[in-house]
Image (spheres, rainbow, N blue to C red):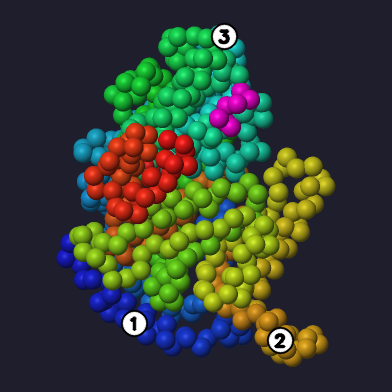
Amino acid sequence: MNADTRTRLDRTPEWTALGEHREELAETHLRDLFAADPGRGSGFTLQVGDLHIDYSKHLVTDQTLRLLQELAVATDVFGLRDAMFRGEKINVTEDRAVLHTVLRAPRDAVVEVDGQNVVPGVHAVLDRMAAFAERVRSGEWTGHTGRRIKNVVNIGIGGSDLGPAMAYDALRSFTDRGLTVRFVSNVDGADLHEAVRDLDPAETLFIIASKTFTTIETITNATSARTWLLAGLKAGPEAVARHFVALSTNAGKVADFGIDTDNMFEFWDWVGGRYSFDSAIGLSLMIAIGPDRFREMLDGFHLVDEHFRTAPAEANAPLLLGLLGIWYGNFHDAQSHAVLPYSHYLSRFTAYLQQLDMESNGKSVDRQGRPVDWQTGPVVWGTPGTNGQHAYYQLIHQGTKLIPADFIGFANPVDELETGLAAQHDLLMANFFAQTQALAFGKTPDEVRAEGVPEHLVAHKTFQGNHPTTTILARELTPSVLGQLIALYEHKVFVQGAVWNIDSFDQWGVELGKVLAKRVEPALTEGTDVPGLDPSTKALVAKYRELHGR
Ligand code: F6P
C-alpha cells in the first residue's frame, strides 16, 4: 500500500481485530498458556544464525501472532523493507536512501543510489581502514616524534560514539591489550580531561568521528584535543597529520579543521548516524580488534540482513520482535522496554539501543506529517544482570507497570577468563533463567501460604507473574554474534516504524535544543539579554551567573 494514501493505522480492520483479541485475552495468564500447551517452550522459538530466540514467555497465542502478521501485511512492512534494501529514498523528510545494509554487503553485491552502484565504494573504504588499522597495530604508523601509537581516542557523539564505544566493551577480550582505547563524547571538559590526563601525546592518535563534522560537542572536543596535543608535543600544526584522522561525510569541513583529507575515511549520506557504526565510524574498533575480526562482525550483520530480507513472516525474527513490541505498546499500554544483557561485556549495549530505537521511533507525526493517534517508540532502558536485580527488578516483578524485557545471555564466558572466574558464569546464567521464570510464572498466594508465610505477609510475598520476556541465547559473545544482535535490533526498529507509518530515519527532535543552546551561551558568558528567553530560563541563567561568580 502506498504510504501517501494508506489508511490510518488505528482505522484498519487489523488494528481493530487486535484490540478485540486483547480483550479476549485479558484474563489469560502465562500459566494458562503453558498449561494449555506444554510444548510452547520449544515451539515458540526461532533460530537465526547463532541466536536462539525464545518468545514462549509472551502473552500471545497462535492467533495473536497471526493477527500481528496481518497487521504487518496491511501496513506493507515487507514492501518498505524491500524498498530500503533496493536503495529507494525511504527517509522521506530528508529525501535520502537508507542503506546501512550495504555497509556489510559482500563485494559482489550491486545496490544503486541515483543510478550508481555504491558497494565498491564501501569496500574501498573498508580496505583503506584495514590497511590503516594494521599500520597502527603493527607500530608502522608512528606519531610526530616517531614513537609508536599506544593510545587511540575516539572523539564523537551519538551515532559517532555509542556504537564503537559499546562494541569496544563488548569485544574487549578480542582487543589488542597493548592499546588503550578511549571514547570522548560529552562537551563537559571533564570527559576529555579524564580520557587524556594519563596519556602521552607522542603516543596518542585521535579519531574525530562526525558524519556532518559540524557537531558542536565533537568539534569543541577535537579543538581542545589538538591544543592538548600540540602543547604536549611542543610542536606546531604540522604534528596534526600523524595524530588526527577523521571519519566523516564532509571532506570540506574536515579540511577546514586542519585534518589532511588523505587521513579521512568517508561514508555517505545514505548512512544514518545511529546506523553508521559498521561504516568508517567503526575505525577505533577495527584498530582494537583487527580487520579480520571486524569483517567477522560485518558478516554477522549481513547474516541477519539476509534473514530479515528473505525469511517468511512467521519465521522472521526482527518482524516478530517488532510486532511483539507493538502488541505491548499499542494494546497493553506498556510505555517502556527493558533490555537486560547477562554479560558484563554488554554494559553499554542498552545505551547504544537507546539512540537506535528512541531517536528512530520517538516520533509523533506520520510520514505524511499528520499527528499520530497511536503510541510510537517505547522508552528503552536497562543495565546488565545481575546488577539490575538488586536495583530496579523489584518494580518489574511487583510494581504496577507492564515492562516487557529482553534477556540476552551466553552459554559460555569469553575464552580469556581464568578457570575460577569462568566458573562464575553458571551462577550468572542461573540468575538469567530464574528471572524470566519468576517474571512469567510468579508465585500465587496459595504457594506462598504453603511455605508457611503468615497471612498478613501473603500479599507482600505474592508475585503476580505474567511479565513478558524474550530470551536471546547464543553460544558465546563473538564479533559475529555482536553483529547479529545489532542487526536484529536495527530491523526490529525498522518494523515498528513501518507499522506506525513514521520516518524512522530522521531526527528533527534534536534540532531545537541545539539551536537554543547556541542562543543561550552568550547569556551565560556575557550576560547578554537573549531575546525570546522565557522567564523561568532567564531566572535560572541569572542564578547560574550568580553562583558562577560572574
Ligand atoms: O543527536 C543528533 C545527531 O545528529 C545523531 O543523529 C548523530 O548520531 C549525532 O548527532 C552526531 O552527529 P555527527 O556524527 O554528525 O557528529
Check contact, mark 2 vs mark 3: CB within 8 A.
Answer: no
Q: What separation in Å lies between label 3 and label 1 (alpha carbons)?
A: 69 Å
User: What's the residue type where badge 3 is placed?
Assistant: Gly
Foreground of the two, 350 or 191: 191
Residue depicted at x 60% and y 12%:
147
Mark 1 neighbour class, 10 Å CA radius: few under 14, some 14 to 19, many 20 or more? some
**Could you say which disc has been placed on residue 146 in the image?**
3
Residue carrying label 1: 17
Residue pointed to by mark 2: 458
Cβ–Cβ below 8 Å for labels 1 and 2? no
Image quarter (top left, top right, bottom left or bottom right) of the N terminus: bottom left
Residue 8: x, y in percent? Answer: 23, 71
| CA distance for labels 2 and 3 | 71 Å
Check residue 63 in the rendering and tell me which mark sits there, or answer none: none
Q: Identify the image quadrant of the C terminus.
A: top left
Residue displayed at 56% across by 21% down: 204
Earlier residue among tags 2 and 3: 3
Total number of numbered labels?
3
